[in-house]
Every structure is written in structure tokens, then in C-alpha cells.
Amino acid sequence: MNLQQLEYFKIIAETKNFTTASDILSVTQPALSKAISKLEEELDVKLFQREGRNIKITEFGDVFLKYAKGALSEVEKGKLKLKEMKNNSDMIISISSTACIGATFIPFLISSFFNDNSKVKFNIDNQSTDEILKGIKNNHVDFGFISDIKDLDKYNNLEAILVKKEEYVLIVPKNHPLANKEEVYLSDLKNEYFIAYNNKSSDVEKSYSDLIGYTPKIYAEPSESSILSGLVAAGAGIAIILNTPLINTNKISVIKIKDKIDDKSIYMVWNKNIIHNKNKMEFKNYALNMSKR
């Protein structure tokens, strides 16, 4: 038994005429008769009986018709549900980034993209670089944003392009003696207490020691960037962070660092074997053009 047989049976029962049914279904009468005969053979009952040139549904056929209609209706509902899911899926973009990039770059990228694409929805999470690459490889994530691409050669189906370079800046509370400075040397900060972002994932981030060349006095190590900024604003210490438009300059002063420090590179990664839909391609192109803005 298959759905085609059930559809044939339903149309014949409704029209009570094989000729009319064959015209509606665009099949030959012999093919229609053969399909019904096979269905009756499987059910071991007669579904129709002839009355001259027309046919009449039997008692068995009348009972079975209710179930056939129910089955066809449920299948149609299932098809509509899948179509709805596909349409929703076309509007959802899944991205994953390391914690540091997720706290600084991703909110700015998403909010600026939303200005012209308000119907698109994002699934966003923070993971380690290794988890991001595996997720993209297995098609669980559409796009990843990482700063360390040394392991990319392990994945021959992935591609990465530099989309942004973020500079490091010093942030201090508004009432700090350095608040009105435009630039500082890192060597001038040895007596300061620092707030250090504590990223517990396996993501490789620059430590303060690597960044400034000496081990500073650490006052607190929050795991959330918003807490870090809040502590600085409250006067608990100073911090070196990535310079992004998300810094609240009403409560914090941003100071350039005179020392030569490598900028943080942000790479966008995707599975080059996947054909992305229109919305995902628009987002991809938008992100790839970030460096031009």
C-alpha cells in the first residue's frame, strides 16, 4: 500500500466514476483499475462495486475511506510543517565565536547587519576554537569567528578569511589620573591594579604578561566582559581590552597605547562545501566587507 493508491481510492470514491477520476488524476483508466485491484487484494475486501457505467463504494470501502482521508490529511500536514521548518531555517543564521570575540566583535557585527536585515534570526554561542571548527565541519554551525587559525589545515573543507583587526586600548575610570591622557606607555602602568578577563575555555588569548611584557597586579578576574567594564567604571582597576564601539565612554575613558602591540586578528570561517542560501550569503558578504568599513 502506498500514498498514490490511497489518493486514487479517495478520488474514485468522491467522483464514483473511473473515467472522471482518471482525468482528474491524469492517469489511464487501466492504470487506475490496476492500482485499486492491488489495494483490494492487499486489504482482502472489495472497495467498489459496479452499477452500470458508474461505481458504488462498498461498506468496506466506506469505512476505509475515513482512514484513507485521515492518512492523506496527516501527510499533507507533515509536508506543510516541513515547508514551514525549511522557511524558518532559511531565516536562521547560526554563528559561533570564541568568548573574547563574542563579547566584543559579534554584538557590533550583528547589530549593524540587523539595520538592513531585520527579518533574519541568529543562533549565537561561544565555544573554543576547536569546537567551532568541528561544528562548522559537521554543518552544525554556519559561520565561525576565531583569532587562531593554526589548526585550520586539519580541516580541508574549511576556509577562513581575515575580516577585522581590533587594536588593544587601555580603559580607566573617569576619575582616574590617566583619564585625560590620549596615549600611555605600558611601562607607566606597573603600579596600577588591573582587571583581567578570565576566559576559562581552551581558546588561546593573550595574557597580560604576554601583552605588556611584565606581570601586573591583578585585582579581579571576571569571566564576563560586562562585569570587567563595570569594575573599571566603578574604580576597581584598569584593563586592556579590544577597542570596540561597545565601550561605554560615559563611564570609562579609552586611552591609546604607545607601545607596539599586535592587533587582534578576527577570522571568519565556513564550510566551503556547503551552498548557503540567500540570507546566509548576504551575511557572509557583509562580514567579509567589515575590513573595508
Image (spheres, rainbow, N blue to C red):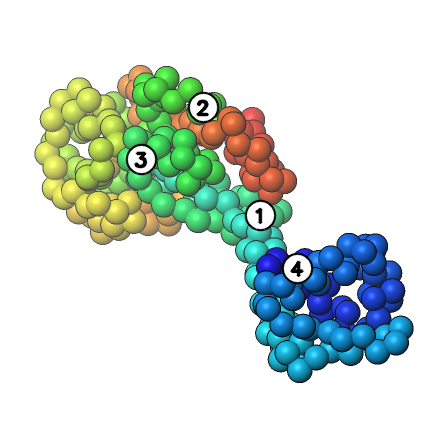
- Residue at numbered disc 4: 38
Nearer-the-camera pick, 7 or 235: 7
The dot on residue 131 is 3
Helix, strand or loop at disc 2? loop
Say whether disc 4 or disc 1 marks the residue closer to the N-terminus. Answer: 4
Cβ atoms at labels 4 and 1 below 8 Å apart: no
- Residue at numbered disc 2: 157
Say whether disc 1 or disc 2 marks the residue closer to the N-terminus. Answer: 1
Helix, strand or loop at disc 3? helix
The dot on residue 126 is none
Q: Amino acid at mark 2?
A: Asn
Which mark lies nearer to you, 2 or 4? 4
Packing grade of label 4 (10 A; few <14, some 14-19, many >=20) is: few
Q: Amino acid at mark 3?
A: Glu
Q: Assign the C terminus to one quadrant of the image.
A: top right
The image shows residue 146 at horizontal and vertical percentages of: 37, 30
Q: Is residue 138 above or below residue 159?
A: below
Helix, strand or loop at disc 4? helix
Residue at 67% from the left image edge and 72% from the top image edge? 46
Measure the C-alpha gap from mark 3 to mark 4: 53 Å
Say whether disc 2 or disc 3 marks the residue closer to the N-terminus. Answer: 3
Residue at 12% from the left image edge and 30% from the top image edge? 216
Cβ atoms at labels 1 and 3 below 8 Å apart: no
